[in-house]
Image (tube, helix red, strand yellow):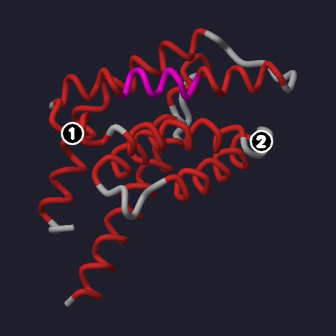
Amino acid sequence: MVFSSAIKRWFIISLSFFGGLVLMFLQLPLGLNWLGSLWVVLILLYWALMMPQYINVGAATCIGIFLDIVYNTTIGTHSLGLVFVVFCIIKFRQKILPLGFLKTALVIFCLISIYQILLFLIQVYTGNYCDIWSILGGAMVSALVWPPLALLLFNCQRKFRI
């Protein structure tokens, strides 16, 4: 029984990350391409908030390196940002969980803003071009997407009892 619940847990988590990757690779119009990468980050933040014993800083490092390879950025750029925000969400998990969807969306807005500011600073330091206006836009879209995404993942988590 324990073995089947572990398989079920990892299957649901992997399936949600696969869905985030599919959404990340969708071809968006040229001005909206910054919306794609945030899906994986939001899913990572959800699982780190709900199941920090399985999805933690190590998973954030692996996903960050994967995003670095996909976006052809300096290795460690996304990892640094993801490790920082995942550490924050795990550290303050007990204070974030009772807040509810809307206040948690505000926390997600702040965390995504910090993540994107870290990415911007690293890209400026390495001499790469980055659009500063996408920082606020990506954080606002993430805050708007968070409640339905968290509700969907929570219902999957509850339905499959993981």
- The residue at which mark 2 appears reads as 72
Residue farthest right in this picture: 127
Q: Percent from the top left, x then y, of residue 92?
A: 34, 37
In the picture, the disc for residue 148 is: none
**Could you tell me the amino acid type at mark 1?**
Leu
Magenta span covers which residues? 108-116
State the image quarter where residue 126 is shown.
Answer: top right
> Is 146 or 50 nearer to us in this picture?
50
Give the residue at mark 1. Answer: 97
Residue 96: x and y, percent? 26, 34
Looking at the picture, does residue 154 appear above or below residue 143? below
Q: Locate residue 55: give its quadrant.
A: bottom left
SS of the residue under disc 2: loop
Residue depicted at x 30% and y 70%: 9
| Residue 34 image offset from top left, x and y in percent | 57, 25
Query: Label 2 is placed on what type of residue?
Result: Asn
Depth check, mark 1 against mark 2: the one in front is 1
